[in-house]
Amino acid sequence: MPQSMMRHCRLTFVTVCLSLCTTLAAQTSETHYPIGAVVVAAANGYSSREAQQFHLQWLKHAGFNAVETEALGMAEGFASWDVAEKSDGEYDWTIYDQYIEDAAKAGLDVYLQILNWRSPPAWFWEKYPDAYMMSPLGGKDQLVAIQRDDAKDLPAYPSLAHPQYKRVYDRFVRALVERYADHPSVRGYFIGEELGLNNIWPPANYYGLDFSPAIMDAFHAHLRQQYTHVDAMNQAWGAPQRYKNFEDVTWSSQWANDSTHYAGEWMAYYQFLQATFAEHFNRSARIIHEVDPEALVMVSGFEIFASVRMGHGTYLPLIDEVDAFAYKSYWHPNRQYIDWISGITGKQVWVSNLNERESTTGPVESQRYIEPIYVRREFWRSYASGLRGVFLFIWSPLMPDHLQKHNLLEAMSDGSTEPISAAKTAGQLARFLNDAWPTINSFQPSEPQIVVHDPNKTFIGQFWRYANPTAERMQTAPVSTASDRFDKSMRTVIAMSRRFTVSTSETLNDRLGDNRKLWILAGCDLLSDQVVDKAIAWVKSGRALIIDDQTARYDLLGREVNAFASLRGQSNVLVLQGERWEKDKAEVARLQSFIANSVPMPHRIKASNHESFYEKADIQIMHAPDGRELAVITRVGSGGTVNNTVDLKISWSTPHQTVHRISPFAVIDQSPKPLEHTAGTSATDVQLLGFEDAILLLAH
């Protein structure tokens, strides 16, 4: 293992059992788990090259192994397209060269952000003044060119359909990647971040609702290809006499004010616009892969569940030529996001900005505060779900001189300085993973044990880690064409904001024949006979079923039929009570108890001084191809004192000869008790000690 990957002895770190690494063949010296950082140095970048070098060396000292540039200020300016290409086809790579050189000297991998879609160089606008995105700000009739707003520090946006924009931007991407394709420190590229398309109408839109001449020409060509004749389009949109020609379909404020009658226009336009947006990223990914096949290509910040600023992620299945999707931390939906994206696309999932605990009060340096407890607990919870890399976002806006104390460092009692606690914790994590990677690299998350059909958000939020979301994945799974994928994914996400009423039952036979133990029907009032028959057979086979008290109660004519009347009252059937059962604590507790008793999870609380397991501990089981298992145990809630412990029993899938306890973040002088190793162990008793936020049990 090279020196750059060895643990740094200047920071406190508890040694892992290196003998465990002999259980697998050693990985290549270049293999490691990316624990990176994004550092905002100051409003205008670093004060000097020396300051930039200090920051990068500090990251390595803190334990990180990678850095992401974003569009942040460097020593000589901002690493962005408009700075690099000052004139048409002429590039100045000084900013990039210096930063990559400094990162390489510090021993850090580099992931470059190629900030696309906004802020082309000044010469571009002078040469192509018709390339601006045209948006109806506030939903008005008038279209406004989205130009640079210096007062609000808002960038200019080009139309993604403008042929000259596509040409010069693609040329820039190719030139950048060609320059660094052979650089050993440049490992990948972020080709888009936080620039999605809104799923609601905003009062002032800067995020993609474009009605420029270029994109409307392309839209009309799309409509002509889809419908062939304008009468077919009118008929499909429920307005037989509305349009005489395809070119008559233009923006009108009626679209925003009367979405019922103009739903056809909205759906067709959104479908086309998001496909155009996705193709912009796909083109960039194709160029990067062509020039540098080894590079990892990612997009970040397109949240699929809920995001007003960044736009919803219905079009993520269309961005199918990237290698990974990254999301902003806000860790609450981490398992949902990883399951959903990996299920739809098969892509890796990363976290590009781990910056939980945000506030909007106080000076800017206090608006991003990362508690070490978050790094310790939430990383492992996401890792056990399949997270493939993470970047810690560090705000350091006040740094008058790199030798003076700033908020990358904190003062110690002896007058020395050390990295901030969250960064130190991430550094410990990086060094632990470097040591343990040959052992834990092959483990994959457990398959969920619950089939979910048409659930509501409350169920997903509480039990997704147990759930197989195949029913919802099928709505966005790749089918015949990109437009079909978009249509299914968009309708699914629209339905998600209500109660997931979009699921169909045609493929249900494919989902109920596996080894899942529980099936949930919630929020869907109309079920086919096929679904009802399968559910009844499911229960008769001894497996459990949860149904909403409204599920299948009415047929299309409004007659009360209650298709599951014969199942009500059986011990393996739970009927949810009330229209808003998820707001009823007693009902939720009944649901939790039913799932715990009906689904044989691979763990159980043996005994505890806590009232609720769900508030105090989280256990996920990972599996390796050779039959070994890894239990990832993380503390949740606010507990964590020395005397505050949780006793657990881990039930393994098969008996194991030995079980090793690994504590990545053990506290000095608080060594955990070793496990009793018993040949043929099928269950393991373990105690989560009060000071431990995460432990691993390796059974083999």
Image: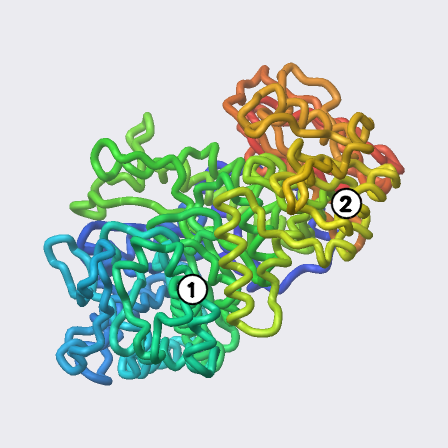
> How many other residues sit within 10 Å of disc 1, few (<14), some (14-19) or many (≥20)?
some
- Seen at 16% across and 45% down, the residue is 400
Earlier sequence position, callout 1 versus callout 2: 1
- Seen at 58% across and 25% down, the residue is 615
Q: Position of residue 389 (x, y in %)?
A: 51, 54
Task: Please state if 393 lies on the left or on the right of 623 as rendered.
Answer: left
| Residue 281 can be seen, yes or no | no
- In front of the other: 493 or 244: 244
Q: Which residue is mark 1?
A: 264
- Seen at 36% across and 59% down, the residue is 197
Q: Looking at the image, do the residues carrying marks 1 and 2 touch, with CB atoms under 8 Å apart?
A: no
- Seen at 72% across and 42% down, the residue is 450
Task: Please state if 61 lies on the left or on the right of 545 as rendered.
Answer: left
Task: Please state if 171 lies on the left or on the right of 657 as rendered.
Answer: left
Query: Which image quarter is the C terminus in?
Result: top right
Answer above or below: position of 233 versus 564.
below
> How many other residues sit within 10 Å of disc 2, few (<14), some (14-19) or many (≥20)?
some
Q: Which mark is residue 21?
A: none
Answer above or below: position of 333 versus 147.
above
Callout 1, which amino acid? Gly
User: For the residues marked 1 and 2, what is the alpha-carbon distance in whole angstroms?
Assistant: 33 Å
Task: Please state if 117 lies on the left or on the right of 190 as rendered.
Answer: left
Q: Which residue is mark 2?
A: 532
Q: Position of residue 294 (x, y in %)?
A: 52, 73
